[in-house]
Image: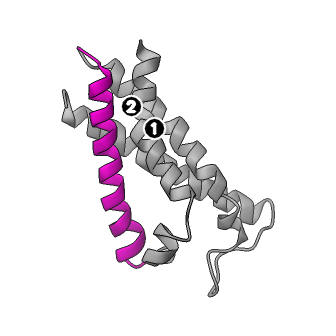
Amino acid sequence: MQNFAMSMLWFWSAYLLVTCVGILHTVFNIYVLKMSPMDAHGMGEGYERTKPWHPLYNSLLFSLFGWLYMRGLAVPSLGEALTTGAVWAGICVVFDLFGWVLVKHPWSLTFREFYIDYQPWITLIYLAIFLGPAVGFLCVH
């Protein structure tokens, strides 16, 4: 990677923003659209109805932040974009395991809930994150 520090700045910015958008969408569904919240039986309709939107959030935001990263490089290339996307997706897989499965909090899920029951959305999300810098590269050129 040509600029790992800058790549991480854009990656974590996108990751935090996409997480906030997902949370705000869930809150909107619960309080404005009056969908059911999380309870002892599951995450609730307010969250469940956001799932098909998660790949879209990730596609848009990781492509935007991939574009910001690629635009700042002296020599942007498709190879750089694919390497960056692989690093970003790899970090997400590991960080998600800790942040959403292993560390217990009110919104944590089991391994099965996150990696199996969350299909096809989680796969599409990781694909969007991987392709984000490549989409950004294509927009630079």
Q: Amino acid at mark 2?
A: Pro
Choose between 4 and 133: the one closer to the eye: 133
Image: magenta residue range: 75-104
Question: Vertical placement of 9 versus 35: above or below?
Answer: above
User: Please, what secondary structure does the residue beneath circle 2 have?
Assistant: helix
Residue with the mark numbered 2: 133
Residue at 64% over, 77% down: 38
Q: Position of residue 8 (x, y in %)?
A: 27, 40
Choose between 31 and 68: the one closer to the eye: 68
Residue at 30% over, 51% down: 90
- 38 drawn magenta: no
Q: Determine whether label 1 and label 2 are within 8 Å by CB.
A: yes
Question: How many numbered marks are there?
Answer: 2
Residue 23 visible in the picture: yes
Residue at 64% over, 83% down: 39
Residue with the mark numbered 1: 62
Q: Alpha-carbon neighbours of circle 1 within 10 Å: few (<14), some, or many (≥20)?
A: many
Q: Amino acid at mark 1?
A: Phe
